[in-house]
Image (cartoon, coloured by chain):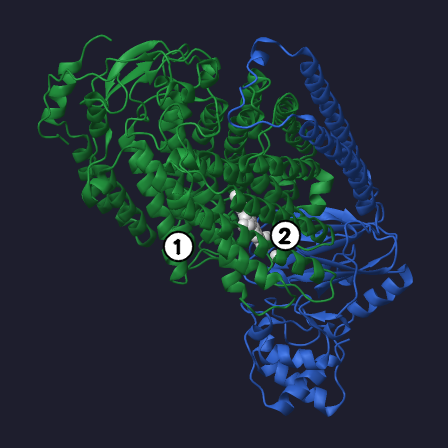
């Protein structure tokens, strides 16, 4: 499995960092208020005389207006109001700061959520340069990223805690969000809106690389799948094309062009399988293909029954898709 | 229903103490008829309320058991205890049960019991409607649990977002049952709201002007008005949902011009006020208990009432804070941030007023007061996280994470369940005539309080560490394992404390110390009558001269069983006669004759249930199912000759 960061309080980009500052301010104010209220309560408890059901009620208070208490209550309400107004202002300023973040020279991505995986399209000005991957997003550090969000079926929500807040993906509407990763690393993200059976296993990863490394990765992703040269992978390729795999998945440069499942052109280069459900090892890949329902009950991928050597060949082929 | 031997020109009047022939006649007049049929025909508000309270508490226990199973599943990463299908049903049923079948109804149930007693009247308004509302609530809730036990529980969440809950992604009948159950329970809530509003406005004891109404009654009145505005929104939404599913309309289908966000607006326009429908009665409980145990009148009565009303208004202005992640225009977000934060102010007013009350009081440390103190700790903390969630940038990080699960339980359990448990201890003697054990009560409180914080505090941190909610499992190594284990241990502790409460309540029914009319030395009217109250509540209707009538008069204990009030007498003792008063200053206005027990509200509720269950399967059920309903309603309202003649003979000026 991939080691990855996912912590609201450990930000690695400007959005999450702004939010963390606001969080610290709010936390400080709230802690002080909470402590003050509890202290007042504790004092009241300690200084009040004890009584029982027979004690005569303090009715004389009713006639007296209790000006001292009244002043304290009014002061406490006024103080709370001022603090709240300050927090509202801080919140609105943070919101504006987030909106003003520069998006010049941004990388453009289009993320489409499916039950229960992510499709990621890199949209380049030159259409031929665009390419598609799944469940793993690579971005260059220091460069803003604009993500266009779409949903294919139900509502999902895109959330990478260490980089930015979440945004819903809505069927029939397009939303956008942007973020920037300032340090290289792997950041974990996941669907935050309940989206059915396998909502729990709908993670993804954002891999932030220095620009050169990112460029190399993108260049590799743009290439169509390489033709296998050894016999076992060649056999595996043939099995892929004639079994049900090709009805749902695409491998660029082959006849498999379906879009119901994740694009597998470079599947072996990704860290995990099935939206973070499994590590991307040959063994796990075999387990997944043989019986996806065992691992992700309810997933739309059916089991594929293959003889052991056929399975080896198929997985051998998928391993060549780097 | 006509009682044999019922002389239309009766001249037996109320007004004397227990033991007199008049009192015996009153008791007979206001009792429910005996036998099974009589049980189904009952309309006395106390009988209905007792059933209602027990029913909602059973739903609370059921919802709690579902939560315990969820927590067991989440105790360890990758657990195989329940699969995704069952887990999704569990949290849907838990949320739906707690919100629709427990939290709001239990408040209404307690109100049905207490409001007439606190107002010094003999009955709730529209007693048959009240019975009908109970029956449909019961049938709606049972329907949901029956399908759950049969393995077809709804699984799209208590918020049932479309399109996940729509026909394309939730085939089968699960969501249909959910949608119909919503319409049912909300119909019940609406009817109860009408009953409470009418009772408060027209049936107060003479002299109980608007500014002498007990604060709990104010809280329930404001709640009832909120119900009137909030519930239609969700009933509309669930009806649109069932139409999408049943007759192929496309309200929520973007492919056909529908809109998925429409559901969220309608749902949260109800769903946010819903939280206050639970919270305001909780505040009412506190305002009833704090003065009693601080032995002084509440500080800032007027400010309390105004802040209840302000909360109700503001609560309708911030539903959008549940939808910040949906992509809203900039300016709107600032408005809803401000509204969401400012609603903390009326709550702050209430909290400071209670503090001032405690500050100036003499304290009687009984179990109800412990729950009040627990409320302060938990609710104020939940309020603080609420302020965090109101801020758009912060919300975008923690929305739909475990931080929200922590926040919502701090507010709901701190703001409603703790006051409610305090209220159970406080009013138990008024319902059963006996006190609950203080020793078990203390154990109950401390286990609940500690268990609660152990269960829910770690969830704040889980949310900040990126754990989303509504997940049936998570992977090891994400840094969530230990805190989830702790949370589960806390949940088990809560379960133990609730068990202790049940033991205490059951034992005290027989073995509790006899309570007497006013065991706590409280000041409001419900303590003026025996415990449990006679069927007619008061043998003589009290006249009120202040906010704490029992404190302003010689204490009842000092004078024997009957408080030395001025009281009204002269109402008929052998027919259900009632005194209505004017809305503002509670001057005697009318003498009313109240309907007798009848089986027809029950039959009507059965007929309505049949229609709704049928409509899960075919739209034609709406057509054929309305015929039995029409028959039952006709029988319900059919004028009865004997009853009419009694009414006519009594019709004269007060
Ligand atoms: C008795 C102790 C309780 C425990 C241990 C408990 C536990 C839980 C858990 C584990 C969840 C699921 C969180 C998720 O997966 O997102 C949950 C959700 C929820 N709980 Fe509770 N809960 C308790 C009491 C209550 C009460 C008293 C109420 C309301 C008055 C309540 C209202 C809710 C609601 C509305 C949800 C959201 C359901 C959803 O996401 O659809 N809970 N609770
Ligand atoms: Cu999703």
Which element carries disc 2, helix, strand or loop?
helix
On screen, B595 above or below B571?
below
Q: Are marks 2 and 1 in contact (CB under 8 Å)?
A: no
Could you tell whether B266 is left or right of B133 in the image? right
- Position of residue B346 measured from the top left corner of the image (x, y, whole percent): 62, 24
User: Disc 1 sits on a residue from what chain?
Assistant: B
Q: Is residue B97 visible?
A: no
Chain (blue): A
Specify the quarter for ligand 2.
Answer: bottom right
- Position of residue A81 measured from the top left corner of the image (x, y, whole percent): 71, 23
Which element carries disc 1, helix, strand or loop?
helix
Q: Is residue B398 visible?
A: yes
- Asked if badges 2 and 1 are on one and the same chain, I answer yes
Total numbered labels placed on residues in the image: 2
Residue B590, quarter of picture: top left
- Position of residue B362 measured from the top left corner of the image (x, y, whole percent): 61, 24
On screen, B503 above or below B534?
below
How crowded pointer 2 is (Cα within 10 Å; few <14, some 14-19, many 20+) is rated as: many
Label 2 – label 1 distance at C-alpha: 26 Å
Query: Which residue does the numbered mark 1 point to in the structure image?
Result: B145
Residue drawn 37% across the image and 38% down it: B432
Quadrant of the frame with the N terminus of chain B: top left
Chain (green): B
Query: Which residue does the numbered mark 2 point to in the structure image?
Result: B455
Quadrant of the frame with the C terminus of chain B: top left
Q: Nearer the viewer, mark 2 or mark 1?
A: 2
- Position of residue B115 measured from the top left corner of the image (x, y, whole percent): 40, 27
On residue B165, which mark appears? none
User: Disc 2 sits on a residue from what chain?
Assistant: B
Distance from mark 2 CB to nearest ligand 1 atom below 8 Å: yes
Q: Earlier in the sequence, mark 2 or mark 1?
A: 1
How crowded pointer 1 is (Cα within 10 Å; few <14, some 14-19, many 20+) is rated as: some
């Amino acid at each position: 499995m991939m080691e990855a960061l996912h912590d609201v309080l450990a930000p690695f980009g400007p959005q999450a960092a702004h939010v963390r500052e606001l969080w610290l301010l709010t936390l400080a104010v709230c802690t002080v208020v909470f402590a003050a209220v509890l202290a007042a309560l504790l004092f009241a408890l300690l200084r009040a005389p004890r009584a029982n059901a027979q004690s005569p009620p303090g009715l004389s208070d009713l006639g007296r207006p209790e000006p001292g208490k009244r002043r304290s209550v009014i002061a406490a309400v006024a103080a709370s109001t001022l603090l709240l107004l300050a927090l509202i202002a801080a919140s609105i300023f943070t919101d504006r700061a987030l909106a003003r973040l520069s998006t010049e020279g941004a990388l453009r991505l289009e993320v489409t959520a499916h039950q229960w995986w992510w499709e990621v399209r890199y949209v380049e000005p030159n259409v031929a340069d665009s390419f598609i991957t799944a469940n793993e997003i690579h971005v260059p550090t220091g460069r803003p990223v604009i993500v266009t969000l779409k949903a294919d079926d139900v509502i999902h929500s895109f959330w990478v805690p260490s980089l930015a807040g979440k945004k819903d993906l809505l069927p029939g509407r397009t939303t956008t969000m942007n973020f920037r990763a300032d340090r290289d690393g792997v950041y974990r993200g996941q669907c935050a809106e309940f989206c059915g059976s396998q909502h729990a296993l709908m993670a993804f990863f954002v891999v932030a690389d220095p620009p050169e490394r990112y460029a190399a990765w993108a260049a590799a992703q743009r290439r169509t799948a390489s033709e296998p040269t050894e016999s076992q992978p060649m056999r595996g390729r043939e099995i892929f094309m004639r079994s049900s795999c090709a009805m749902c998945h695409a491998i660029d440069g082959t006849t498999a062009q379906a879009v119901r499942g994740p694009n597998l052109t470079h599947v072996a280069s990704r860290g995990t399988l099935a939206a973070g459900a499994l590590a991307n090892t040959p063994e796990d890949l075999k387990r997944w293909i043989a019986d996806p329902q065992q691992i992700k009950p309810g997933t739309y991928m059916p089991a594929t029954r293959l003889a052991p050597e056929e399975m080896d060949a198929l997985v051998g082929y998928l391993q060549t898709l780097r | 229903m006509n009682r044999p031997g019922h002389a239309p020109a009766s001249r037996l009047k109320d007004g004397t103490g227990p033991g007199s022939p008049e009192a015996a006649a009153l008791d007979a007049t206001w009792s429910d008829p005996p036998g099974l049929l009589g049980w189904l025909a009952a309309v006395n508000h106390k009988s209905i309320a007792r059933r209602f309270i027990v029913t909602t508490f059973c739903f609370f226990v059921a919802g709690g058991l579902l939560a315990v199973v969820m927590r067991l599943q989440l105790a360890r990463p990758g657990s195989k205890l329940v699969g995704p299908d069952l887990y999704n049903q569990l949290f849907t049923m838990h949320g739906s049960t707690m919100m629709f079948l427990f939290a709001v109804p239990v408040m209404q149930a307690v109100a049905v019991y207490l409001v007439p007693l606190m107002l010094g009247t003999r009955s709730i308004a529209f007693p048959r409607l009240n019975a009908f509302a109970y029956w449909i609530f019961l049938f709606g809730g049972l329907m949901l649990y029956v399908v759950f036990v049969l393995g077809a529980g709804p699984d799209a969440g208590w918020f049932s977002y479309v399109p996940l809950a729509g026909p394309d992604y939730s085939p089968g009948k699960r969501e249909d049952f959910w949608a119909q159950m919503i319409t049912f329970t909300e119909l019940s809530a609406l009817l109860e709201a009408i009953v409470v509003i009418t009772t408060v406005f027209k049936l107060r004891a003479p002299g109980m002007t608007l500014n002498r109404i007990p604060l709990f009654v104010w809280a329930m009145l404001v709640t009832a008005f909120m119900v009137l505005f909030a519930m239609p929104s969700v009933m509309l939404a669930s009806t649109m949902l069932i139409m999408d599913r049943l007759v192929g309309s496309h309200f929520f289908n973007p492919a056909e011009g529908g809109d998925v966000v429409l559901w969220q607006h309608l749902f949260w326009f109800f769903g946010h006020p819903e939280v206050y429908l639970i919270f305001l009665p909780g505040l009412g409980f506190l305002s009833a208990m704090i003065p009693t145990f601080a032995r002084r009148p509440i500080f800032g009565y007027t400010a309390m009432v105004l802040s209840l009303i302000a909360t109700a208004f503001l609560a309708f202005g911030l539903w959008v804070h549940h939808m910040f992640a949906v992509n809203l225009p900039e300016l709107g977000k600032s408005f809803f941030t401000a509204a969401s934060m400012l609603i903390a102010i009326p709550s702050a007013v209430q909290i400071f007023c209670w503090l001032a009350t405690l500050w100036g009081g003499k304290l009687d440390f009984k179990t109800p007061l412990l729950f009040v103190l627990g409320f302060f700790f938990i609710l104020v903390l939940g309020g603080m996280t609420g302020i965090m969630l109101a801020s758009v940038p912060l919300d975008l990080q923690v929305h739909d994470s475990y931080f929200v699960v922590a926040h919502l339980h701090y507010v709901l359990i701190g703001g409603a369940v703790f006051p409610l448990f305090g209220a159970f201890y406080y009013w138990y003697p008024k319902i059963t005539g006996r006190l609950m054990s203080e020793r078990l009560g203390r154990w109950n409180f401390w286990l609940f309080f500690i268990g609660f914080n152990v269960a829910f505090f770690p969830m704040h941190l889980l949310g900040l560490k990126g754990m989303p909610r509504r997940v049936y499992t998570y992977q090891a190594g994400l840094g969530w394992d230990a805190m989830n284990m702790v949370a589960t241990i806390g949940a088990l502790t809560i379960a133990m404390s609730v068990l202790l409460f049940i033991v205490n309540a059951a034992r005290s029914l027989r073995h509790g110390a006899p309570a007497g009319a006013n065991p706590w030395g409280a000041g409001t009217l419900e303590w003026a009558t025996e415990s449990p109250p006679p069927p007619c509540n008061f043998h003589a209707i009290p006249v009120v001269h202040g906010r704490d009538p029992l404190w302003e008069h010689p204490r009842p204990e000092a004078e024997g069983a009957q408080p030395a009030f001025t009281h009204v007498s002269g109402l008929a003792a052998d027919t259900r006669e009632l005194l209505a008063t004017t809305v503002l200053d509670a001057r005697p206005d009318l003498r009313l004759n109240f309907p007798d027990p009848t089986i027809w509200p029950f039959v009507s509720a059965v007929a309505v249930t049949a229609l709704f269950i049928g409509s899960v399967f075919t739209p034609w059920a709406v057509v054929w199912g309305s015929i039995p309903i029409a028959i039952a309603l006709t029988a319900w309202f059919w004028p009865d000759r004997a009853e009419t003649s009694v009414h006519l003979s009594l019709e004269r000026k007060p």
